[in-house]
Each structure stands twice: as C-alpha cells, then as structure tokens.
Image (cartoon, rainbow, N blue to C red):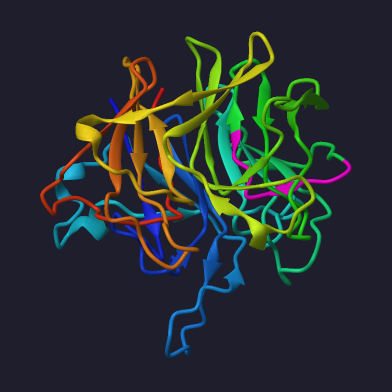
Amino acid sequence: MFYLFYLLLFIECAVADQIAPRAFQGCVLNVNEIHCYGGFTHQPAESVMQYTNASNDHFYLSIDTLDFSTLSSANAEQQHQWQYVARPAGHTVLPPLANMAMTAIASQTQFILYGGVTEPASKTLTDPLWKCSTNLNNSMSTPPSQEYYTLYSPVVDTRASTIWTWGGLINTTGIASINSASTFDYAKEKWNTVDGDRTNSNIWIKHTAVFIEKTGLIYMMGGYELKQGEVSSTGTFNNMTNIRWFDTFLNTWGMDQATVSGNQHITSRILHTVTPIPDSNKLLVYGGYNDQEAKLSQDYVYVYDFVTKEYTSLNFNQTGPGPRASHSGFNRI
C-alpha cells in the first residue's frame, strides 16, 4: 500500500481541535503511525497568520484504521484523532524546532530529527541531532553531534544503520556548507565525512534527497544552488531537469539530464517532496514554491522515472490536496 501525507500551513486529515495550525513541521511514518514534530505556529490573536513561533509538539495518528475515503467527510475528525505524545517525568524533552530534517530509520521503528530552527531563530542548536524510538515508549536521545550542523539539507536513511546528508546552510549563519556529505552510523553513533562532487562543487539548499535501495543511489532534485561559503541570498534556482545523484556503493557523484514528456516546461521549485513509488522505477514529485517562497508551483505533481530519466505531468482535474509546499510525503515500506 502506498501512502502519501501532506501538511501546509495547517494540519490536514481531520486534526483534533487541540493541534494548533502550523507549517514547516516534520512528519514520518513509523510502522503504523504517522509521527509529526514541531513546526512554526502562529499566535491566535494575530489578525494575519504569521507562522513564526517554533513548537515542540510531538503528536501521532494511527493509520491501521485510516479510511482515506472519509477524510473529507463531516465526521472524519471523530474517526481519526491525532494524539499528543506524553513525556513522563524524567524523559528528555526536545526544544522547539521547525525547518528540521526528519527521517524514519531502523525499519520505521525510530526516527531522526536533524538541524532546524529553534527559539529565538538566531540561536545555534546545542543538540542538532535527536533520535526517537517509537518502539520504546517514544523515548528521546541525543547522539553525538558534529563540529557544525546544516539547515535546509535533507536527510535519508540508507538502510545500513546509516543516515546521509549533503548541502544546506551552516548552523544559523545563512552561509553555504562545504562540499562534502556527512553520514551518521546510528548503531555505532559515529559520524563520517564523504568527499563531495569534484566535477560540480556548488552546494544545494532546500532540495530533496531520496534513497533507492535496489540501486544504492540517492537522487537530489530542485532547490537553490550556490558556491561554498556564499550567503543564501546569492543562490539561484536549480533546473528540475538537473538530477544530481550519489552512489552509496561506489561513493561517486553524477548528474542526469532529465526530459519532460511532451516537451512540457517543468517549473523550478524548493520545499517540495519526492517520494518513491513502491515496486517501480518511479518517484512522485509534489508541490513546492517557485518564487523565493512566495508562489506555489501550479504544475505541482509529476512522476519521474529514474530509468528513462523522464518526468510525466499528472492532472488531478482539480481534485486532491492541490498545490502546496513545506509539506511531508512518505511511503509505507
């Protein structure tokens, strides 16, 4: 079964009344539960919704009995209730976080949170890496961190007790990271550095990364490109037809030049999602902003075939969740 889950500006899918509207939260699927953490919320008294207040909410929704056909019905909220994760006395509590990277690990029994923004936004995180064990009463731990962490750099689980991340901005400086990838062995709790691409040393931020287990490749799409050490305001949009990849078996980098079915133009974008479609050679590309985080991409859904290297646009005929960005997307393995 293939599940997708989207959040933007307010939580969708019949959220319980007590869950505040939010954006830039993180969500993952852990076995049979959708777990979400943090995000920017807004003050109820504000006349205009400005999502500027980072949250440390942790809540979840069971999908075992989730009926997607009833999610828009009047009684959906009573059928599908989100639950807060209670933190017993003595348990570690995370700080408020938003814009962090989040990925399920260990066969979807745990998840990792990495980087992000806290309160105040200029504050550097003391513990930029957190691990939650949903199979152990949602206990939180803080593995060792690196010399610095990155913001707006996606994290993927490579299924070898290792997460991988590349790109982004250094801490809260707004400066592009160095051209190397970082891996963290969460079984041994050890960081390692992987040499960057020598052919193209430019850094990407606000892009996506997705790991394909059968090929060992990590595909990266979208985002901004800028040189190492440059400030983020100098970045330029990546063309979506430039698909960067990293081979986890050979530790090599490369670039695929994609095409679009029917020679259609595909809009450049940031803060979108890319999700593997199970039992296929295809990825679902959804949403994103296309104008400095101000305009939602209207050509918002494509299927990308990483074997033929071709995008195909999908038309939902004004049904479904519609254009959105800074949402979450995942599948059930």
Front-most of residues 301 and 231: 231
Residue visible at 39% across and 55% down?
7
Q: Is residue 280 above or below residue 236?
A: above
Q: Quadrant of the C terminus?
A: top left
Residue beneath the point at 59% across and 26% down? 157
Q: Foreground: 53 or 148? A: 148
The spot of residue 224 in percent (x, y) is: 57, 49
Q: What percent of the width, then of the height, locates residue 325?
A: 41, 55
Is 207 one of the magenta-colored residues? no
Residue 170 higher or lower than 157, as above or below: below
- The answer to whether any part of residue 85 appears in the image is no
Quick check: 60 left or right of 135? Answer: left
Q: Which residues are magenta?
A: 147-155
Compared across the picture, whether 256 is left or right of 189 comes to left
Q: How many marks?
A: 0
Answer above or below: position of 39 versus 303.
below
Q: Position of residue 332 (x, y in %)?
A: 38, 28
Q: In this view of the protein, can residue 159 be seen by the observer?
A: yes
Figure quadrant of the N terminus: top left
